[in-house]
Image (cartoon, rainbow, N blue to C red):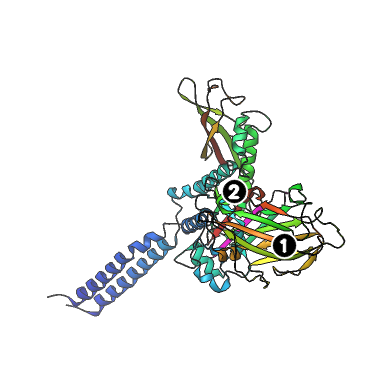
């Protein structure tokens, strides 16, 4: 037998159900979750920035001018205009902004080359950063550079000294 | 017998179920942070501005006046598509020119978003002399915007500074022949494809600027010499019997959109038939809008002829031909372009 009491309980149930559904919907739809996959965005921005700076350092300012980047690599680990200057100029380019400079950027420059034995060796071009622990969230940007016959000063002796060669400039860039 | 309660309850349950199922895709949308979308749009806009010369290319979009800005399809700032990150100063100036583009223009020709994004573009140029030049357009930055920063170089137009040179000081001139100084633009040399577009002068897109310092060329610096006219001549060496022909042009009308001729540093521009005395210098800027009227191609030779006439006297020894080439280009300046979208 159907009576009014049964009808009342059903209405309460429906009202509660609708309220629960709405609450769940509002809570889920207004929550913004920063998923692990999103961390590539700042990395991509940093990588693009570093890549731009290396490309612009490799672009001569005049038609018959020379690449600033190649000049630094030719000087190897020399104190003046060598790997450290390369890192400093690279960071200056990365830090430039319209407002205050983006000061908390750090970098470390490496050079990869083919040894006389045929293997590939990587050697630091700039002095080691004392605060670098190896656990930083770094990005890596690279640029190929053509070098003349002479081996740059300070580069290990297993780099060929008798032929021109292409070497890879690698820069590790991170936020301190 | 089916209960009425059950029927009503089941119907409502089914309706709620359908509603919930239809909401599922919308529920997942919240899992994506809004910053990702802004960052992606900022990155895309940065790529369009820095790596693309825009559309149309010839005549370039930056030459459109306010009445024809609707013809602009895309506002890229690169010199050419082969030279990413090298921006052309004329494009940069037009892009940031106050009042030329409305916010809707930036949205439809640079951002290309489905929704009306807010934006802030800034370009900080570091000049070789150590000074900074900041160009900016858009709204102040709120928290939580999408961002990209691109490092660029900026190509400025060249200026031919012609000072004293023995080659142009012709002391053997016949006084009955008016001295004529020619600035020659050989397009086959200027547009040499083996030279990167970053270091080429293309008079069809870059202004041609000639500054002549008359010191040393005047027979009497007090009386000066009379610049009778400036004319444009062209030749196509690939045609049979090539010869220079005078280009029809409104020589006696002053039009700052086409050219500016100033004599002795005065602010009032002259027409190309000034017929006035020159005591110190001549400055001519020929805009791409004028050069595009000359129907020149990559084989043409364009002569700009400055004729001095003080007959029967001779008052200047300036005579000869100056080759306008890419040596006059200034060094590229470094800059940083920042795009913020929200």
Q: Position of residue B233 (x, y in %)?
A: 61, 61
Give the label, 1 or 2, closer to the camera.
1
Residue B307 image label: 1
Q: Residues within 10 Å of mark 1 (few under 14, many from 20)?
A: many
Magenta segment boundaries in residue numbering: B115-130
Residue on which the image places disc 2: B199
Query: Does B312 sit left or right of B24 as displayed?
Result: right
Q: Does the magenta run of residues contain B128?
A: yes
Q: Is residue A96 above or below residue B111?
A: above
Q: Nearer the viewer, residue B317 or B296?
A: B317
A70 left or right of B81?
right
Q: Label 1, label 2: how many angstroms apart (C-alpha)?
A: 31 Å
Image-quadrant location for residue B318: bottom right
Q: Is residue B228 visible?
A: yes
Q: Chain of mark 2?
A: B
Q: Is B135 covered by the magenta stretch?
A: no
Residue A170, x across and y down, in percent: 53, 35
Q: Identify which residue is drawn at 72% across, 53% down.
A: B161
- Disc 1: host chain: B
Tell me which residue sits at (37%, 63%) in the image.
B26
Depicted B118 relative to depicted A113: above or below: below
Q: Residue furthest bottom?
A: A4
Location of residue A130 in the rendering, given as x and y in whole percent from the top left corner? 62, 32
């Amino acid at each position: 037998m159907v009576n009014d009491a049964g009808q009342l309980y059903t209405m309460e149930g429906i009202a509660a159900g609708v309220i629960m559904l709405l609450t769940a919907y509002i809570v889920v739809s207004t929550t913004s979750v920063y998923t692990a996959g999103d961390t590539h965005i700042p990395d991509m921005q940093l990588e693009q920035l570093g890549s731009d700076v290396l490309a612009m350092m490799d672009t001569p300012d005049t038609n018959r001018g020379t690449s600033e980047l190649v000049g630094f690599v030719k000087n190897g680990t020399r104190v003046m205009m060598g790997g450290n200057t390369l890192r400093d100029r690279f960071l200056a380019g990365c830090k430039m902004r319209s407002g205050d400079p983006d000061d908390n950027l750090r970098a470390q420059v490496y050079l990869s080359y083919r040894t006389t034995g045929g293997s590939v060796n990587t050697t630091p071009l700039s002095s080691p950063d004392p605060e670098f622990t190896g656990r930083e969230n770094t990005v890596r940007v690279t640029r190929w550079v053509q070098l003349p016959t002479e081996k740059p000063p300070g580069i290990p002796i297993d780099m060929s000294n008798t032929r021109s060669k292409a070497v890879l400039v690698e820069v590790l860039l991170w936020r301190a | 017998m089916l209960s009425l309660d059950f029927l009503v309850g089941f119907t409502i349950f089914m309706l709620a179920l359908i509603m919930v199922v239809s909401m599922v895709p919308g529920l997942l949308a919240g899992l994506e942070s809004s910053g990702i979308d802004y960052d992606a749009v900022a990155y895309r806009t940065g790529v369009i501005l820095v790596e693309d010369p825009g559309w149309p290319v010839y005549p370039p979009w930056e030459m459109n006046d306010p009445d024809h800005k609707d013809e602009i399809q895309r506002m890229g700032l690169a010199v050419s598509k082969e030279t990413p990150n090298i921006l052309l100063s004329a494009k940069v100036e037009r892009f940031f020119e106050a009042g030329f583009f409305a916010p809707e223009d930036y949205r439809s020709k640079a951002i290309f978003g489905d929704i009306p994004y807010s934006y802030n573009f800034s370009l900080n140029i570091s000049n070789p002399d150590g000074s900074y030049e900041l160009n900016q357009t858009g709204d102040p930055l709120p928290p939580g915007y999408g961002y990209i920063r691109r490092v660029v170089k900026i190509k400025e137009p060249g200026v031919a500074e012609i000072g004293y040179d023995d080659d142009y000081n012709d002391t053997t001139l016949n006084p009955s022949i008016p001295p004529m100084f020619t600035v020659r633009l050989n397009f086959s040399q200027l547009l040499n494809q083996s030279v990167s577009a970053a270091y080429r002068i293309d008079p069809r897109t870059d202004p041609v600027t000639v500054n002549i310092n008359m010191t040393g060329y005047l027979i009497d610096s007090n009386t000066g010499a009379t610049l009778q006219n400036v004319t444009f001549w062209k030749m196509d060496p690939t045609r049979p019997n090539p010869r220079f022909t005078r280009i029809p042009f409104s020589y006696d009308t002053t039009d700052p959109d086409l050219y500016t001729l100033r004599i002795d540093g005065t602010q009032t521009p002259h027409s190309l038939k000034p017929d006035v005395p020159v005591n110190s210098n001549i400055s001519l800027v020929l805009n791409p809008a004028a050069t595009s009227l000359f129907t020149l191609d990559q084989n043409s030779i364009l002569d700009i002829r400055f004729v001095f006439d003080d007959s029967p006297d001779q008052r200047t020894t300036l005579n000869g031909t100056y080759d306008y080439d890419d040596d006059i280009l200034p060094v590229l300046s470094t800059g940083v372009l920042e795009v913020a979208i929200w």
